[in-house]
Image: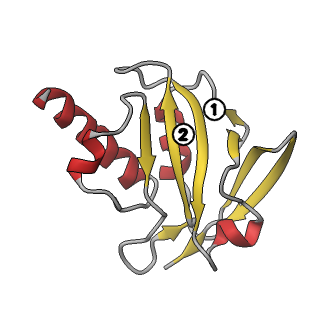
Amino acid sequence: MAYVDSWRSRVIQTIIYFSFSKPSMSGRQLHHLAVTTLFIAATTAHAAGRPVIGISFSIETDGFFSTTLKKVTVTAVKPGLPAEKAGVQAGDEIVAANDIPIAGTPGGKLKDVLDNAKPGDHLKLRVHRGSAEQLVDIVVGER
């Protein structure tokens, strides 16, 4: 189990880094998560000039050691930051990011989209909300 916890911790730290976030859960809390779901903390820039979006989301993969995405769901939106201004809401299921579909896509592609985002760039999310889909255009902010 120590290997799995170590692997999960590295994966979460990597995703958090590339999504401009910091963890809001301790390692002990992460130990109790379902093995195919990763929770990403609310977006917080670590230094001036860093990009900021302002969402927390959970990532579900198609298996324990898989990096293939199955579902990404917004769990929280930080007030006053770009995601809220663009209209993202908690509970939105992200169907695509910059025209890259979520389901069936390797997690590295989503990481690349987030990694390459710079302040002023547009992050276009296609979200499923209720029974409808809509396009949300987030202008990446700066801290």
Residue 97 is situated, as x and y percent measured from the top left of the image, at 67, 43
Q: Going by the image, does 106 lie left or right of 24?
A: right
Residue 92 is situated, as x and y percent measured from the top left of the image, at 70, 49
Cα gap from disc 1 to disc 2, whole angstroms: 8 Å
The residue indicated by pointer 1 is 102
Comes first in the chain, label 1 or label 2: 1
For the residues labelled 1 and 2, say whether their Cβ atoms are less than 8 Å apart: yes
Tell which of 42 and 112 is nearer to you. 42
- Closer to the observer: label 1 or label 2? 1
Instruction: Examine the rendered structure and indicate whether residue 112 appears above or below residue 105.
Output: below
Helix, strand or loop at disc 2?
helix
Residue type at mark 2: give it. Leu
Q: Residue at x 67, y 50 (%)?
A: 91
Residue 71 is situated, as x and y percent measured from the top left of the image, at 59, 32
Q: Quadrant of the N terminus?
A: top left
The residue indicated by pointer 2 is 110
Q: Going by the image, does 23 lie left or right of 141?
A: left
Quarter of the image holding residue 73?
A: top right
Residue type at mark 1: give it. Ile
Quarter of the image holding residue 88?
A: bottom right
